[in-house]
Image (cartoon, helix red, strand yellow):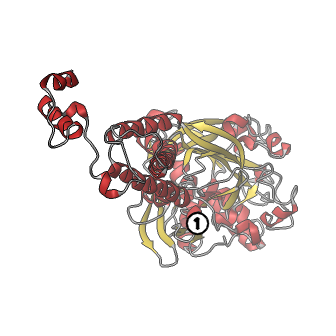
Amino acid sequence: MLFLYVYAVRIYGFLMHRMILSDRCYSILAILGVIFLSGGFFMLATDPYNFFFNQRILFVPGGEIFELWRAPPVDLYLRVWVFNITNHEEFLAGNEKMKVVEVGPYVYRELMTHENVTFNENGTVSANPRHILEFVPEQSVSDHETDRLILPNIALLSIADVVSTGSYLTKLGLNLLIRQTKTQPLVEMSPKEFMFGYSSTLMTLGNKLLPHWINFEKLGLIDRMYNFEGDYETVYTGANDINAAGLIETYNGAPQMPQWEGRCGNIANSSDGTKFRSNIQPNETQKFFRKSVCRPQTLMMTNHTIQSGLEAFVYKFPANAMDNGIVDSENACFCRTKQCLRRGLLDVRQCYYGFPIALSYPHFLDSDDSLRNEVEGYTPDRRAHETYFVVQPKSGLPLEVAVRFQINMSLGKIGNVANVRQFEDMVIPLLWTEIRMYHLPDDLVWKFFTYLNILPHLVASITYALIIGGILGLTVWTCKYCKRTRPSQGVSWLDGDDYETPRMDKKFADYRPTKRSSMSPKELEVYYNSLVAPNDQDLEPNEYNEMIV
């Protein structure tokens, strides 16, 4: 600002030097002063920068941040670690408790888009979310097709858990089928089969006999997690509230998840991770929702940082975020039955076809100690297993994302089902995932660095330069006006062009003599003759010459 002030002073000094003899220039200077001053105060009152940036945030066809939401140009990855069972024979024989070792990561690039976009008249936009996965071998631990692991037979264990509460005849029929098909609870398969679908006699029969319940022939965990077929979400455009642009109004036509009651299922004003609330204040909480998580998650700000040159807030899940009413009674709506799951487990079976699926943090971080004691091989590490979001508060854009959850099977009283007696009342780890975005593309970082770090200062500098320039212009004009209206004192008749005769009779003012230095010798002769000698009297030559000298 000091530089601008000095620069403005120099400009006006130059103008004064060049225009000092021109009254018209002073008038122009005064007009410019009024224009500059008005423009500066107008910019202060209207805040053109915020108007400009809000237009970037607003969801309109072709809008800048809308296009980032519609098809994010970011490198988004799904990283998967699978729990390989290393002592399956000893465990099935009842000689040892289960031992697992995580194998991974198997990395997939996630191509996230919002398709079939429709703008609605109520300030919302609807679209179908799509999440296509492509295997990235160069970032993976090995080939997901050729690796062979010992993994739980999800089909058998799931049907055993569902039927365990059924009638005696139902269980009898299932036991006959299991023995006849020689279906085992632990099987060897590739990670790809485990994640994206493997053949199972039980799944095939279920698909044929109960197509409304099991509408797929192959069962794969990631395949089911990323099944968005027929889903649609409606988000706010920001037309009514610019800060809400990109936040979810409804998912599949409702602001409430049918799996939960009350606040536990309220997904309104949640983010799917592509765009959070804009103009975030440090004390504001955020909400995150993904269909695979089967619930909205509250995010709390834990840190303020600078990332890629941009201001950012760091968000994490609050303590006891996976509580189902054991710690906080307000979370009791996450417990569907009187027998709630243990601390750190979230029952999501209603989101996964009634199968006994439960979510937790990886390696049962922040969970009940008994969960880690049932199976050997857990090594919880907060740095590696905790979820966090780094969000730019002005725009609401995520700068870095790491969403980490573990998928488990929480089995009940299934001891009376064939071949699964050892799994009764167990929580078995299946795999854990990390949805990862390391950073925004460089061109996007530079664009928002310009928007957020350069433009505000540029607009502020122009605003204050206009105000200072206007004040200087009006000040110079005022000083000149005051000088013109002040009575002249001690002014010589021969002072030159600056001489003024405010109190002299106008007709005599017209006869002001000119400067002597501008007369030739002949003109001086005539001039003195007219002043000194009468019309009828001549001067002697010698006297005249003396006067000239």
Closest to the observer, 453 or 16: 16
Residue 527: x and y in percent read 19, 37
Left or right relative to 151: residue 438 = left
Closest to the observer, 415 or 329: 329
Residue 546: x and y in percent read 20, 21
Left or right relative to 415: residue 117 = left
**Which residue lies at the image location 59% right of the left edge and 70% below the top edge?**
249
Tell me if residue 88 comes above or below residue 357 in the rendering. above
In which image quadrant can residue 90 be found?
top right
Left or right relative to 170: residue 488 = left
Residue 247 visible from this viewpoint: no
Residue 409 visible from this viewpoint: yes
Residue 316: x and y in percent read 70, 47
Residue at the outermost bottom position? 121
Tell me if residue 409 comes above or below residue 390 in the rendering. below
Determine crowd level at label 1: few under 14, some 14-19, many 20+ residues with C-alpha closer than 10 A.
many
**Which residue lies at the image location 39% right of the left edge and 53% below the top edge?**
504
In which image quadrant can residue 96 be found?
top right
- Residue type at numbered disc 1: Ile
Counting labels gives 1
User: Which residue, given by chain and number where applicable, does mark 1 sit on?
Assistant: 248
Left or right relative to 514: residue 226 = right
Q: Quadrant of the C terminus?
A: top left
**Which residue lies at the image location 49% right of the left edge and 46% below the top edge?**
479
Residue 339: x and y in percent read 86, 63
Q: Give the SS element for disc 1.
A: strand
Closest to the observer, 37 or 59: 37
